[in-house]
Image: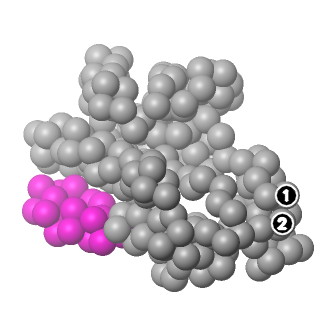
Amino acid sequence: MKLEGKVAIVTAGGRGIGRGISLCLAEEGANVVVNSFHEETSKKVAEEIKAMGRNVLAIAGDITKTNVMVKVIEDTINTFGKIDILVNNVGGGRMTSKEAANNPLEQAENEWDETYEQNLKASVLMCKAVQPHFIKQKSGKIINIASVAADSASALTSVPYAVMKAGLIRFTQALANELGPYNINANCVCPGIVYTDAWQHGAKHRVENTPAYKGMQ
């Protein structure tokens, strides 16, 4: 197994893509820290990982909040003694009306703020929080989950979401340059449409408000 003995943190790891990442890391031998907004989802994934024979720590809480970020880092160090991998998977976007779906001037200020906190700020601050530990041990892997939506603000997504994911890509590039000399890797992954439970939950709204989604629910 490629990750035997490694310790990985996955934010928003209780559902969808995050759950898949958490389980894959465990399958490769890693001990996994699963953060999820809801205690129920974090514990459920933790039980799946335990069944594989891996050590796991479930931490519920809103990872966009600084106190939760600190708790995740501190609890990981206290439990496992180190951090080897950070996967910033937290992200998402609010459902918008048909009129506002692709018009940046129709987006409310609070939507820009919320989308920034969830899709860019949280990942930036988590990288900042884990950096001293990685530098001290002269190793570490950072994987930021962006989206193909970053390439263009098409009719398939809201503009704030696309903008923040594009920002995450650029941040990751800068981070890789900064941390490379310390033997720390930073990479960004841009998934396309993944048919998770969260996708299905919002499918009806998407199809009704954005014609480009028709046939994709």
Contact, mark 2 vs mark 1 (Cβ under 8 Å): yes
Residue that appears at 51% across and 82% down: 152
As drawn, 71 above or below 208: above
Would residue 204 appear left or right of 70 to someone viewing this image?
A: right
Residue placed under numbered mark 1 in the picture: 204
- In the image, the segment drawn in magenta is 169-186
Would residue 73 appear left or right of 24 to someone viewing this image?
A: left
The 10 Å Cα crowd at callout 2, few under 14, some 14 to 19, many 20 or more, is: few
Magenta-colored stretch includes residue 175: yes
Identify the element where label 2 is drawn: helix
Residue placed under numbered mark 2 in the picture: 208
Residue 50 position, x and y percent, is 62, 23
Identify the element where label 1 is drawn: helix
Residue that appears at 82% across and 67% down: 207
Residue 162 position, x and y percent, is 49, 70
Decide if residue 13 is in sight here: yes
Residue 16 position, x and y percent, is 67, 47
Would residue 139 appear left or right of 87 to someone viewing this image?
A: left
Residue 24 position, x and y percent, is 59, 47
Magenta-colored stretch includes residue 95: no
Question: In front here: 18 or 148?
Answer: 148
What residue type is disc 2 on?
Answer: Glu
